Amino acid sequence: MKLEARHIFLTINLTLFTILLYYLWFIALPYYTYTYYYEAIRNTIILVSILLLVAMSLSSILILRMGKEEEQEEIDIGKH
């Protein structure tokens, strides 16, 4: 994978996760502000946010690692 493609994937990854977190906190949660379910929804959104951050971190690490492995393969082929 080329360096530019990795940056595009990381940008898309970050953008989609940011949009989803924004939606959860600023659109979905206020819908339940004065209801009986507010605390349960807020706790669920906190859990989902933490899990999304973990997923974003892992996918970013994998994208970066995959690019490093491909760069090493290209270098190894060039030496032979």
Image (tube, helix red, strand yellow):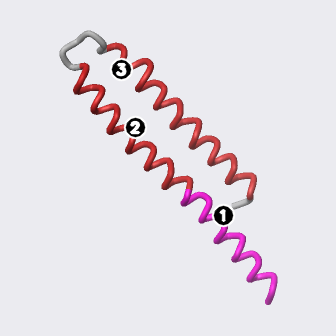
Tell me the quarter of the image containing the N terminus: bottom right
Disc 1 crowd rating (10 Å Cα; few below 14, some 14-19, many 20+) is: some
C-alpha gap between disc 3 and disc 1: 38 Å
Report helix, strand or loop for mark 3: helix
Q: Please tell me which residue is depicted at 66% across the width and 64% down the height of the picture.
A: 67
Q: Which residue is mark 1?
A: 67
Q: Is residue 63 above or below residue 31?
A: below
User: In the image, is 72 to the left or to the right of 60?
Assistant: right
Q: Which residue is mark 2?
A: 49
Q: Which residue is mark 3?
A: 29
- The region drawn magenta spans 61-80
Q: Is residue 27 above or below residue 57?
A: above
Q: Please tell me which residue is depicted at 70% across the width and 77% down the height of the picture.
A: 73
How many numbered dots are placed on residues in this image?
3
Report helix, strand or loop for mark 2: helix
The numbered mark, 2 or 3, whose residue comes first in the sequence reads: 3
Residue at far left of view: 36
Q: Please tell me which residue is depicted at 66% across the width and 68% down the height of the picture.
A: 68
